[in-house]
Image (tube, grey):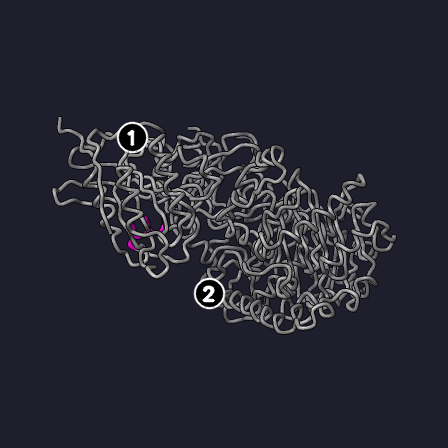
């Protein structure tokens, strides 16, 4: 473990640097305090990251495809093991507790591969591989230097590989499957392939779940070689994820929760009543036409930090601009509007609620993910607000990115909301809010290159950078921020909001960004591990990054550095990042609004 | 492409929450609520987009809930008609919510796909629904869309005409892709609208 090896040698420099600690109330821990904690944490927490596994992660999906055929967990094997009533303890641990480790030996390539079963698989495998690689190329080519927005225009939502079923090699090789089925085993949704053709597979999953259920227990996870099978039971609806992406169990489970939330958003939870009346009820027609919504949710699982942080992010804007937007939203919110949100893509510009109940960040993610047209009025349900009832969402797009959502419980309110929107639009245009939004989209945000050198130079705004700064940046590719800082995410605990720095060199390609995203995701899960945690700090070094995580009661900071970065400097930089965030907080966060504020 | 017609000549009824407030509708400038109904994927949104924006997007997204667009056309007798169009989602989960959108509509446009007999049956369901629960003087149009796909046709023109005649509807076949008959559809509807009396 490289982190242990490196942890001892920086103390001197670090003590020197302690003098430069910014004096601020928000930062409770001095650098040396963290430094003192680090070695112990490095020893006893989950820095069990093997280089090998991380390295594997990097080449996805290309290498995965190459090896996919030998690593796949096959449904048949699961059936057969469930079928045997006397499961041996090695393979059957999953009966007695939440987590299951199917013994590694049983899932060795020789015993599990499809290759043996289906001798002529190579042809299909290579076609599917090419397909995925093509998708990957499309993605990466669309991400420019400023790759913050990964779901760029070229990523097209919609269901892929509709014709496949579980007999297809290509289907079995997909890295991450999501299934939704009913308690009677009827397929409701599958990420890949045709639901109707997957009836047998779906029944298999149902058999596994009910086998454990009949024993008075609940199945949460099956681990089989590189694969994890994660289960989530929501009344009569069963959700299953089968993944070989090495994401932590907690993350996959969180994704299943969001998938369920997305279904509730479309149909409400009262859909389970149909199953009470008729266990064989077919739910697929009710989800007709929503493939794009789900595919964009799955896409968000690999680029949108909101999906594991359970926090939302704001579009950086000058303070006055955001206040202008909030004021006009507040004006209309008295007239029967439950929530008013001005959004830009998945980022919040302003948010006003007429009620004390804050809008849950997960609900915001699911709502923003729900595709709507230029001007529409649709029934939607906010799972965390009231999972049983519909609200009505008035949505209007001011331009391709910026849209207004007004939520009401009154199904007759369309023309009233349309009037509200016209009123809001007039104000937004007059006070230049819409043009400020466009400007922020183009050049706003926190760039690690601009991290101020405290205390000598500090500017309290993201919007007054000298033009020369910017041209300088573009002349220095491959450098990142000071002392090897590549990227950071700062999450404010009180606000339920996070801010993430823009991706800059060298994290420019889609693969790099996705790899970093997964590394953060893993870091998040390890910091919040219920068995060994919660933890306060973690310093981790592997072949790709130095990752530093720092959790306090006020914030969580996740930072990625050059793998050769010095530990003492990294800690110093993290302090600077916190100070920077504090300095510009009224431009990057929605303060006095959103979650904690009573209206 | 056949036509059949039936013209109720009472004034346009306006009740219900999703209706324009009215008031600015007079004999020369009509303002009418139009609702599009039909099975998922028959091309309702494409028809509207072609009519309102002159665009055709073969990859257009599935409508969720209902989207709202408006377009004004001028007739030869110098009257203008502003269509306030509710383009509803065709999916089953929204069937129960359809009354929200068709209540008080002056025009119901029911769309099917000429290559899909199921969608023709679904169209008949919507016709019955509107006859039962729509405004009594609603102008109904039956539209066979995707007329450019002649070689895949499964619903004959004759079937469309016959059903429309039996139910006192206006019938037309359109293609949102080639723009064929799209403007004609809305012009014909406009001509058939009951005019408020000058008094």
Q: Which residue is mark 1?
A: B21
Residue visible at 38% across and 34% down? B129
A367 magenta-colored: no
Secondary structure found at label 1: loop
Q: What range of the chain is rendered magenta? A: B44-54
Q: Is residue A525 left or right of A589 when viewed as pictured? A: right
Res A276 label: none
Q: Is residue A173 left or right of A141 when viewed as pictured? A: right
From the image, give the main secondary structure of the stretch colored magenta.
helix
Q: Quadrant of residue A566?
A: bottom right
B50 magenta-colored: yes
- Dot 1 surroundings within 10 Å: few (below 14), some, or many (20 or more)? some
Q: Which residue is mark 2?
A: A468
Q: CA distance from mark 2 to mark 1?
A: 55 Å
Q: Is residue B152 above or below residue A230?
A: below
Secondary structure found at label 2: helix
Q: Is residue B169 above or below residue A135?
A: above
- In front of the other: A46 or A328: A46
Residue visible at 35% across and 31% down? B103
Q: Quadrant of residue A51?
A: bottom right
Q: Position of residue A576 (x, y in %)?
A: 63, 55
């Amino acid at each position: 473990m490289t982190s242990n090896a490196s942890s001892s040698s920086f103390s001197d420099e670090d003590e020197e640097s302690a003098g430069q600690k910014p004096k601020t109330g928000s930062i409770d821990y001095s650098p040396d305090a963290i430094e003192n904690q680090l070695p112990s944490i490095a020893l006893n927490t989950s820095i069990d990251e093997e280089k090998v596994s991380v390295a594997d992660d990097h080449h996805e999906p290309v290498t995965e495809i190459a090896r996919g055929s030998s690593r796949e967990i096959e449904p048949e094997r699961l059936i057969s093991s469930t079928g045997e009533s006397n499961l041996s303890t090695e393979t059957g641990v999953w009966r007695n507790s939440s987590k299951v480790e199917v013994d590694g030996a049983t899932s060795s390539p020789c015993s599990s591969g499809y290759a043996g079963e289906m001798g002529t698989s190579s042809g299909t495998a290579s076609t599917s591989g090419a397909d995925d690689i093509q998708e990957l190329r499309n993605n990466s080519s669309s991400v420019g230097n400023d790759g913050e927005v990964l779901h760029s225009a070229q990523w097209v939502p919609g269901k892929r590989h509709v014709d496949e079923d579980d007999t297809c090699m290509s289907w079995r090789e997909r890295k991450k499957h999501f299934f939704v089925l009913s308690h009677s085993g009827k397929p409701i949704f599958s990420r890949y392939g045709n639901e109707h053709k997957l009836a047998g597979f779906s029944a298999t999953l149902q058999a596994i779940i009910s086998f454990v259920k009949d024993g008075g227990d609940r199945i949460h996870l099956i681990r089989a070689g590189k694969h994890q099978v994660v289960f989530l039971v929501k009344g009569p609806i069963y959700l299953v994820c089968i993944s070989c992406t090495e994401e932590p169990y907690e993350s996959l489970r969180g994704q299943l929760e969001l998938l369920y939330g997305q279904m509730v958003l479309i149909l409400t939870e009262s859909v389970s009543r149909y199953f009470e009346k008729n266990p064989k009820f077919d739910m697929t027609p009710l989800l007709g036409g929503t493939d794009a919504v789900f595919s964009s949710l799955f896409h968000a699982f690999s680029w949108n930090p909101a999906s594991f942080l359970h926090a939302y992010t704001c579009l950086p804007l000058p303070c006055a601009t955001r206040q202008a937007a909030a004021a006009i939203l507040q004006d209309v919110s008295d007239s029967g509007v439950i929530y008013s949100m001005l959004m830009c893509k998945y980022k919040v510009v302003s948010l006003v609620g007429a009620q004390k109940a804050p809008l849950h960040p997960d609900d915001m993610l699911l709502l923003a993910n729900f595709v709507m047209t230029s001007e529409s009025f649709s029934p939607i349900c906010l799972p965390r607000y009231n999972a049983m009832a519909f609200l009505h969402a008035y949505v209007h797009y001011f331009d391709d990115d910026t849209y207004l959502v007004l939520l009401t419980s009154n199904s007759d309110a369309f023309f009233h909301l349309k009037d509200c929107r016209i009123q809001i639009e007039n104000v937004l245009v007059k006070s230049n809010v819409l043009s400020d939004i466009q400007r922020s989209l183009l050049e706003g945000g926190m760039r690690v290159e601009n991290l101020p050198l405290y205390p000598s130079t500090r500017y309290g705004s993201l919007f007054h950078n000298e033009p020369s700064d910017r041209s300088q940046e573009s002349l220095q590719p491959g450098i990142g921020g000071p002392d090897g800082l590549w990227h950071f995410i700062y999450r404010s605990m009180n606000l339920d909001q996070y801010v993430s720095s823009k991706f800059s060199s060298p994290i420019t390609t889609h693969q790099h960004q996705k790899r970093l995203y997964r590394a953060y995701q893993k870091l998040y899960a390890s910091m919040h591990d219920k068995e060994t945690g919660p933890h306060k700090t973690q310093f981790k070094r592997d072949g790709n990054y130095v990752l530093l995580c720092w959790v306090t009661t006020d914030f969580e900071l996740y930072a990625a550095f050059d793998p050769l970065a010095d530990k003492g400097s990294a800690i110093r930089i993290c302090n600077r990042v916190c100070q920077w965030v504090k300095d510009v907080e009224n431009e990057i966060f929605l303060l006095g609004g959103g979650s904690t504020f009573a209206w | 492409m056949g036509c059949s017609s039936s013209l109720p000549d009472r004034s346009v009824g306006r009740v219900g929450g999703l209706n324009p407030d009215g008031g600015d509708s007079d004999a020369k400038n009509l303002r009418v609520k139009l609702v599009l109904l039909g099975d998922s994927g028959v091309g309702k949104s494409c028809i509207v987009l072609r009519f309102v924006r002159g665009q055709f997007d073969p990859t257009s997204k599935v409508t969720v809930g209902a989207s709202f667009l408006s377009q004004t056309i001028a007739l030869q007798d110098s009257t203008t008609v502003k269509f306030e169009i509710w383009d509803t989602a065709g999916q089953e989960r929204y069937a129960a919510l359809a009354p929200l959108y068709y209540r008080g509509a002056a025009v119901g446009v029911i769309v099917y796909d000429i290559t899909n007999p199921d969608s023709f049956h679904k169209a008949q369901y919507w016709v019955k629904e509107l006859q039962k629960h729509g405004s009594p003087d609603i102008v109904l149009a039956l539209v066979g869309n995707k007329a450019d796909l002649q070689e895949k046709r499964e619903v004959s023109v004759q079937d469309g005409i016959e059903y429309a005649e039996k139910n006192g509807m206006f019938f037309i076949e359109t293609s949102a892709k080639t723009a064929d008959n799209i403007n004609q559809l809305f012009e014909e509807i406009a001509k058939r609208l009951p005019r408020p009396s000058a008094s």
